[in-house]
Image (spheres, grey):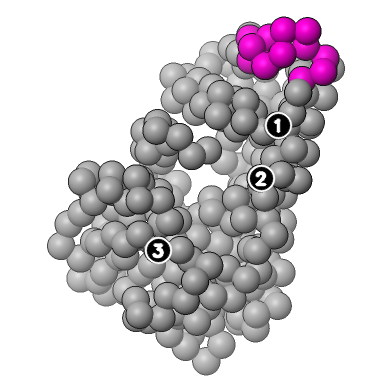
């Protein structure tokens, strides 16, 4: 999803109530030192910062463009941002009470376990690691024409094979915590997308960007569409604008405590 408009898409689709509810469920508390890994535009970090009154939040992202946006829009006392590769050692950032990893591992299918193991090194003994991701990502729609459904499956197969994307990241999170020896593991299942009836402006923009960026650059050649990607894009837009359409995406939240 890396493109010049990604920060805007992230800002538009990120709202405080669900995020703060998830963070409280996971155990965030005032005074904590928190790492927001894959912080993107920085808006998530700002919401987390509200919950750690007297604490500190460090937003971490590998994109220099995202970090520049975050620093310009969201920096505050106790809220800082750093451009870092979270595959590499991060020990110089110090230790944390709480590490937040939301909508990140889905973009790192082959190395998700390595990322989790690397981040656990930053947690204080008994510190909390919270992993949140989608399952069956972008694939749960009803009312879709058969060729459109085949095309979406084809796009996802290409993104998985060629771009390290994982549409089933959510179901794996519990095992990451279990296998690394975390304790007090808890799991919550809810929805992220639940779209029916009239299409709202934010969902329209978010999904049109998904199609324009991810589907276009996936490498899939849209064999059922004589007009190629533009014809696919037009049919998806027509389907998605139809109030009869039903779309949902499961959201799985897992948290656990680092070994003491």
Q: Nearer the viewer, residue 183 or 210?
A: 210
Q: CA distance from mark 3 to mark 1?
A: 28 Å
Residue range corresponding to the magenta coloring: 222-234
The residue carrying pointer 3 sits among few (fewer than 14), some (14 to 19) or many (20 or more) residues within 10 Å by Cα, namely some
Asked if the stretch drawn in magenta spans residue 228, the answer is yes
Residue 122, how many percent across, how many down?
Answer: 44, 79
Q: CA distance from mark 3 to mark 2?
A: 20 Å
Give the residue at x 70% y 78%: 179
Which residue is denoted by mark 3 in the rendering?
84
Give the secondary structure at mark 1: loop
Does the rendering let one see residue 254? yes
Which is more N-terminal, label 1 or label 2? 2
The reply, left or right, for residue 173 in relation to residue 203 is: right
Give the residue at x 72% y 13%: 228
**Residue 163 disc label:** 2
Residue 170, how many percent across, how many down?
Answer: 66, 54
Give the secondary structure at mark 2: helix
Which is more N-terminal, label 1 or label 3? 3
Which is more N-terminal, label 2 or label 3? 3
Residue 244, how many percent across, how many down?
Answer: 67, 13
Give the secondary structure at mark 3: loop
The reply, left or right, for residue 137 in relation to residue 103 is: right
Residue 110, how many percent across, how many down?
Answer: 69, 60
Q: Nearer the viewer, residue 48 or 237?
A: 237
């Amino acid at each position: 999803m890396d493109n010049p408009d990604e920060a805007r898409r992230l800002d538009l689709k990120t709202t405080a109530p669900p995020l703060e509810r998830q963070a409280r469920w996971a155990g965030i508390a005032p005074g904590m030192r928190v790492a927001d890994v894959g912080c993107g535009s920085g808006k998530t970090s700002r919401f987390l910062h509200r919950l750690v009154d007297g604490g500190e939040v460090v937003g971490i992202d590998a994109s220099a463009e995202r970090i520049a946006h975050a620093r310009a829009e969201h920096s505050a006392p106790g809220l800082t941002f750093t451009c870092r590769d979270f595959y590499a050692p991060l020990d110089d950032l110090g230790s944390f009470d709480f590490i937040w990893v939301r909508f990140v591992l889905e973009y790192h299918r082959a190395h998700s376990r390595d990322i989790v193991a690397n981040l656990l090194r930053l947690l204080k003994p008994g510190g909390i690691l919270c992993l949140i991701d989608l399952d069956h990502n972008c694939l749960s729609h009803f009312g879709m024409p058969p060729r459109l459904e085949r095309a979406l499956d084809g796009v996802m197969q290409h993104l998985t094979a060629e771009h390290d994307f994982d549409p089933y990241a959510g179901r794996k999170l519990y095992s990451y915590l279990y296998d690394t020896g975390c304790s007090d593991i808890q799991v919550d299942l809810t929805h992220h997308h639940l779209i029916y009836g009239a299409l709202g402006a934010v969902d329209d923009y978010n999904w049109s960007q998904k199609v324009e960026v991810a589907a276009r650059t996936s490498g899939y050649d849209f064999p059922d569409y004589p007009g190629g990607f533009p014809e696919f894009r037009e049919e998806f837009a027509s389907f998605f604008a139809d109030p009869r359409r039903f779309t949902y995406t499961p959201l799985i939240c897992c948290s656990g405590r680092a070994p003491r």
